[in-house]
């Protein structure tokens, strides 16, 4: 999601833009990099996967456009306890990305995190037909090509993926998002839970982020905020997330949040009633 004045469509609609997805532009010189080695502003378009937690979590980043604003959109790859892979918010399955993923392991789960990040999942599922597609009914209702095998529900995740805790963002039906907490790494994985812009971002998003208070600041996507009212359910949902032993928060449209992740999440959602940390 992005600024309220520039984005109201599903995330994958952003890819239907004048810009090509970055991972399709060129053949990567290397398929995987350590994200901590990225020193120059902007991201290296040749890289398909960046390591967040060695041997456990990677991200794939691409450019997405909407109404003249270019965001970075990120998908998260998690190695499960059985060494198979979970792809959170799948992107278009480019050859380079599939090669990199195939080198990591078998893809077992494709997770649609909310009712916006869903349009590339059918193509990914077609590429990996043995993968279990998990997502909210609201996404399937919007996308007839999206065939869910399991609902993204707390109880289902608990049974199928015991290394995760699923936490629904109650009180925010606009997103209908459920985030995953990966216990072994202390990683809270979401999509549009929060957003931010930084010097790495395209000037269009930097400009819009300054106008909307999202530059160098973790905040709720303005369009989400404008459609969400404070409530006890919302406050409870965020408080549950911030009470977890968070090492980092991984979302779709900003870098990993590793500095005071619980406090920054609480601050972003304080308008909704979240308790300050
Ligand atoms: Fe998004």
Image: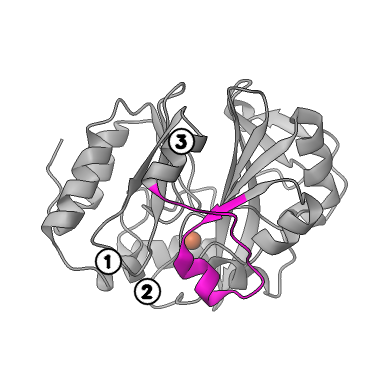
Q: Can see residue 212?
A: yes
Marks 3/2: CA–CA distance? 37 Å
Q: Is residue 252 above or below residue 51?
A: below
Q: Which region of the structure is painted magenta? A: 133-153
Q: Which residue is mark 2?
A: 4
Q: Secondary structure at mark 2?
A: loop
**Which mark sits nearer the N-terminus, 2 or 1?**
2
The N terminus lies in which quarter of the figure?
Answer: bottom left
Residue depicted at x 63% and y 21%: 55
Q: Is mark 3 within 8 Å of ligand 1?
A: no
Under circle 3, the secondary element is helix
Tag 2 and tag 1, C-beta contact below 8 Å: yes
Q: Is label 1 in a helix, a strand or a loop?
A: helix
**Quadrant location of the C terminus in the rendered image:** top left
| Picture coordinates of residue 177, whole percent (x, y) | 39, 57
From the top left corner, tell me how far across and down residue 12 is, in percent.
60, 67
**Left or right relative to 275: residue 103:** right
> Which of disc 1 and disc 3 is earlier in sequence?
3
Tell me the quarter of the picture where residue 164 sits: top left
Q: What x and y, as percent, mark residue 249?
A: 40, 38
Label placed on residue 159? 3
When asked about the image quadrant of residue 146, the answer is bottom right
Distance (Cα) linking label 3 and label 1: 32 Å
Q: Which mark is residue 225?
A: 1
């Amino acid at each position: 999601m992005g600024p309220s004045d520039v984005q109201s469509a599903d995330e994958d609609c952003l890819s239907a833009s004048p810009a090509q997805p970055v991972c399709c532009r060129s053949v990567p010189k290397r398929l995987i990099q350590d994200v901590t080695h990225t020193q120059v502003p902007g991201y290296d378009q040749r890289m398909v996967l960046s390591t967040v937690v060695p041997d456990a979590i990677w991200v794939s980043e691409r450019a997405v456009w909407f109404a003249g604003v270019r965001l970075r959109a990120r998908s998260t790859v998690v190695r499960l306890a059985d060494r198979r892979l979970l792809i959170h918010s799948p992107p278009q399955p480019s050859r380079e990305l599939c090669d990199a993923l195939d080198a990591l392991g078998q893809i077992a789960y494709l997770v649609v995190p909310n009712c916006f990040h869903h349009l590339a999942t059918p193509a990914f599922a077609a590429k990996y037909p043995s993968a279990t597609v998990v997502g909210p009914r609201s996404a399937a209702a919007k996308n007839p090509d999206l065939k869910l095998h399991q609902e993204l529900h707390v109880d289902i995740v608990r049974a199928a993926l015991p290394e995760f805790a699923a936490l629904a963002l109650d009180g925010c039906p606009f997103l209908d998002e459920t985030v995953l907490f990966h216990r072994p790494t202390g990683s809270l994985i979401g999509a549009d839970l929060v957003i931010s812009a930084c010097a790495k971002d395209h000037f269009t998003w930097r400009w819009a982020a300054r106008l909307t208070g999202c530059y160098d600041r973790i905040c709720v996507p303005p369009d989400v905020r404008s459609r969400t009212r404070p409530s006890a359910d919302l406050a409870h949902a965020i408080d549950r997330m911030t009470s977890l032993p968070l090492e980092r928060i991984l979302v779709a449209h900003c870098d990993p949040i590793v500095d005071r992740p619980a406090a920054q999440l609480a601050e972003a959602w304080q308008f909704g009633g979240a308790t300050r940390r």
